[in-house]
Image: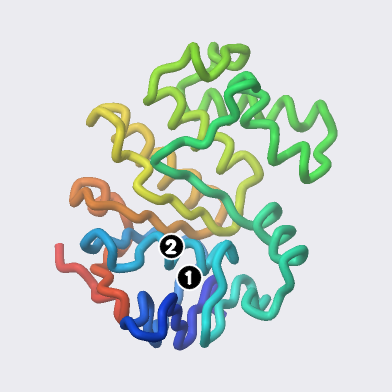
């Protein structure tokens, strides 16, 4: 059984316009890390929102680890996101009033991890992204690259089954982008989950196991 399966998923926002996503089917296996490219406006972010249950499909099914997400109510979907998904966005979404360590610890607190286990995991993840000495610094004291790495450590702290990354390197210099991409890939592989990277960068897409071009209706394998 695939870790993630989309079957004939359709999403339309206006009846008088073509669907943003139409009749899309796709499977992702455990341990797989894939990149999705495509022109702006074709529905790449909409696709991630549908998978995460932040938006709802008009038709079709989305299944994660055998659970049909499209049948869940909002409360149940929130629990799935909290337990099984991690998110990395171009805009960071780091909470400004929490230290780097507290930002990374937040999903673990929501999951009820005990303090000692939580502290050990936060320290390990900050070390993994090269921020071992930055745990007590506030976001305003960090660079854009450091903020993105805090967001990455937070997304990966609970070893999610599915990592969703939406243009995570768009604001980063090439060196920092390479570091972020390496951590994304190695952490997905280390925990046997799966990852989807949305990107406009061919360099970023080349780090994935497979890459696709998305046009709203199909994910076409991208040739090397």
The answer to whether the residues at label 1 and label 2 have Cβ atoms under 8 Å apart is: yes
Q: Pick the quarter of the image with the N terminus.
A: bottom right
Q: Residue at x 63, y 29 (%)?
A: 103
Q: Residue at x 26, y 47 (%)?
A: 204
Which label sits on residue 110? none
Evaluate whether residue 177 shows in this view.
yes
Residue projecting furthest to the front: 16
Residue 191, percent from left and from top: 57, 51
Image side of residue 167 versus residue 97, left or right: left
In the image, residue 112 sits, relative to residue 42, either above or below, namely above
Q: CA distance from mark 1 to mark 2?
A: 6 Å
At mark 2, the secondary structure is loop
Pointer 2 residue: 32
Which label sits on residue 29? 1
- Of residues 181 and 145, the one nearer the viewer is 145
In the image, residue 182 sits, relative to residue 173, either above or below, namely below
- Of residues 190 and 22, the one nearer the viewer is 22
Residue 40, percent from left and from top: 25, 59
Q: Residue at x 55, y 57 (%)?
A: 192
Q: How many marks?
A: 2
At mark 1, the secondary structure is loop
Residue 68, percent from left and from top: 65, 79
């Amino acid at each position: 059984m695939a870790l993630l399966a989309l079957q004939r998923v359709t999403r339309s926002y206006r009846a008088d316009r073509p669907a943003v996503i139409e009749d899309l089917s796709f499977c992702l296996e455990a341990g797989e890390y894939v990149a999705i490219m495509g022109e702006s406006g074709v529905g790449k972010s909409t696709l991630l929102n549908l998978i995460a249950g932040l938006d709802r499909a008009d038709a079709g099914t989305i299944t994660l680890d055998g659970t049909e997400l499209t049948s869940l109510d909002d409360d149940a979907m929130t629990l799935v996101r909290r337990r099984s998904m991690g998110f990395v966005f171009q805009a960071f979404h780091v909470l400004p009033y929490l230290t780097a360590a507290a930002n990374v610890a937040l999903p673990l607190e929501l999951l009820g991890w005990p303090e000692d286990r939580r502290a050990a995991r936060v320290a390990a993840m900050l070390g993994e992204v090269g921020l071992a000495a930055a745990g007590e610094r506030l976001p305003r004291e960090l660079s854009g690259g450091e903020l993105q790495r805090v967001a990455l450590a937070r997304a990966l702290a609970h070893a999610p089954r599915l990592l969703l990354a939406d243009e995570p390197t768009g604001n980063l210099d090439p060196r920092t982008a390479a570091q972020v991409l390496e951590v994304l890939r190695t952490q997905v592989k280390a925990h046997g989950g799966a990852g989807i990277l949305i990107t406009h960068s061919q360099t970023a897409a080349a780090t994935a196991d497979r890459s696709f071009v998305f046009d709203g209706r199909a994910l076409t394998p991208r040739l090397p």
